[in-house]
C-alpha cells in the first residue's frame, strides 16, 4: 500500500488489532502447557507477552473506536468489538501467569466494567443492536463476551489463598464413598481419582489450615485412611501438586461447576448461531477483507468454545464435580459406568 506502514495502520488498524487479539488467544492456548511442564525461557517469554498484551490491545482498540470515524468506513468493526471482550476472557487452560495476578483480580474487575461499558456504548451509539440479523449476532456475542470475561475475573479471585481457605470450609470433598474392584487397579487413573478424593487435605495444608482435626470433625477420617492405605504417596503428592496448579493458574474453580458446564454447553451454540446469522446477513456495503476477517473471528470463537467444552467434559475435574454434586441421580448415573465405577 502507498505510504508504507503508517498508511497501512491508518487504514487497517482495527483489522490488525482484532487479528492480533485472536492470534494471542491461540498462542496462550498452545503455549499454556509450557507454564506447567517446561522451563523454556524463550517460550515462557512469548507466553508472558501473550498473557499481558490482550488487555492493552482491547483497551486501545475500544478507545480507537471512540475517537475515529472508522465505523463509517468499516461498519463491521463494531461487531468485532464483541470479540475483544471474548478474547479478554482468555482460554480455559491459563488464567494467571503468576500468583500475583490472582491478587490483582479487582484491577481486572475494573477493566471488565470499563470495557463492557465502552463496547455497550458503541452498540447503542451506532444502533447495531437493532432488529436485523447482524444486530442479533452482535447481542449474542456481546453476552458471551461479558460472561467469559466475568468468568476469568472470578477465577482470579478464586485462585487467591484467601478464597481457597474459605472454600475448604464450604466445598465438600470429592468423595463418592463407594469402593469397586476397579479401584484397586494400580494405574494412573486410580492415582488421579484418589488424588481428587484427598485433595481437601492438600488445600488445607497449602493455606495453613488444620488437616487432621478438621478431617475428623467432618467424619471422613476412616474413609481417608482407607484411601491412603497402600498408596504410592510420592506419586500421589505429585498429582496433588498438579491439581493445586490447576486451582491457582487455570479456570477449574469456575469451569467445573453447574454454571460453568452450562456456559460451556451454550457457548459453542452461541458462536455457531452468530456464524449462521452473519452468513445470512446481506454483505452489500461491506469490504471483502472485513467480511473475511469476520468469518475468521467467528470460526476462531467456535473452535475455542467447542474445544473448551470438550476439554471440560474430558477433564478429571469432572469426576471431582460428580463426586461432590448434590444431584444424587447425576452422581450415580455418571459414576457407575465403565470409566468411573462406584
Image: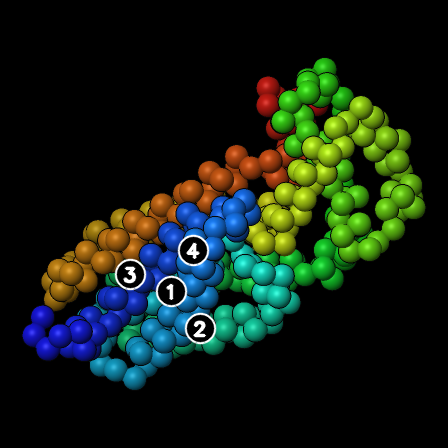
Q: Is residue 139 above or below residue 202?
A: below
| Disc 4: CA contacts within 10 A as few (<14), some (14-19) or many (>=20) | few
Label 2 to label 3: alpha-carbon separation: 18 Å
Res 84 label: 1
Please identify the quadrant where the N terminus is shown: bottom left
Residue at 10 percent of width and 77 percent of height: 3
Front: mark 2 or 3:
3
Q: Is residue 164 visible?
A: yes
Q: Is residue 44 above or below residue 190?
A: below
Would you identify the image quadrant in which residue 220 lies?
top right
Tag 2 near tag 1, CB within 8 Å: yes
The residue to which callout 3 is attached is 19
Residue at 33 percent of width and 50 percent of height: 300
The residue to which callout 4 is attached is 42
Res 313 label: none
| Disc 1: CA contacts within 10 A as few (<14), some (14-19) or many (>=20) | many
Amino acid at each position: 500500500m502507498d505510504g508504507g506502514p503508517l498508511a497501512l495502520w491508518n487504514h487497517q488498524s482495527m483489522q490488525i488489532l482484532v487479528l492480533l487479539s485472536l492470534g494471542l488467544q491461540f498462542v496462550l492456548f498452545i503455549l499454556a502447557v509450557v507454564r506447567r511442564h517446561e522451563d523454556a525461557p524463550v517460550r515462557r517469554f512469548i507466553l508472558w507477552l501473550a498473557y499481558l498484551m490482550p488487555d492493552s490491545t482491547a483497551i486501545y482498540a475500544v478507545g480507537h473506536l471512540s475517537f475515529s470515524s472508522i465505523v463509517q468506513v468499516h461498519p463491521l468493526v463494531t461487531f468485532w468489538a464483541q470479540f475483544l471482550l471474548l478474547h479478554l476472557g482468555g482460554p480455559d487452560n491459563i488464567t494467571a501467569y503468576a500468583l500475583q495476578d490472582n491478587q490483582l483480580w479487582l484491577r481486572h474487575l475494573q477493566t471488565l466494567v470499563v470495557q463492557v461499558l465502552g463496547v455497550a456504548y458503541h452498540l447503542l451509539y451506532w444502533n447495531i443492536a437493532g432488529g436485523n440479523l447482524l444486530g442479533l449476532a452482535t447481542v449474542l456475542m456481546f453476552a458471551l463476551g461479558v460472561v467469559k470475561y466475568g468468568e476469568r475475573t472470578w477465577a482470579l479471585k478464586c485462585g487467591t489463598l484467601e478464597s481457597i481457605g474459605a472454600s475448604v470450609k464450604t466445598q465438600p470433598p470429592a468423595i463418592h464413598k463407594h469402593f469397586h474392584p476397579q479401584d484397586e487397579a494400580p494405574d494412573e487413573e486410580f492415582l488421579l481419582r484418589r488424588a481428587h478424593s484427598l485433595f481437601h487435605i492438600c488445600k488445607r495444608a497449602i493455606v495453613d489450615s488444620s488437616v487432621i482435626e478438621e478431617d475428623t470433625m467432618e467424619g471422613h477420617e476412616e474413609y481417608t485412611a482407607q484411601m491412603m492405605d497402600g498408596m504410592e504417596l510420592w506419586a500421589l503428592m505429585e498429582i496433588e501438586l498438579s491439581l493445586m496448579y490447576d486451582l491457582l493458574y487455570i479456570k477449574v474453580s469456575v469451569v467445573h461447576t453447574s454454571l460453568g458446564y452450562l456456559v460451556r454447553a451454550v457457548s459453542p451454540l452461541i458462536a455457531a448461531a452468530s456464524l449462521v446469522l452473519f452468513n445470512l446477513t446481506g454483505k452489500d456495503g461491506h469490504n471483502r477483507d472485513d467480511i473475511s476477517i469476520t468469518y475468521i473471528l467467528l470460526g476462531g470463537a467456535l473452535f475455542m468454545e467447542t474445544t473448551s467444552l470438550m476439554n471440560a467434559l474430558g477433564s478429571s475435574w469432572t469426576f471431582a464435580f460428580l463426586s461432590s454434586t448434590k444431584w444424587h441421580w447425576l452422581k450415580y448415573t455418571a459414576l457407575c459406568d465403565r470409566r468411573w465405577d462406584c
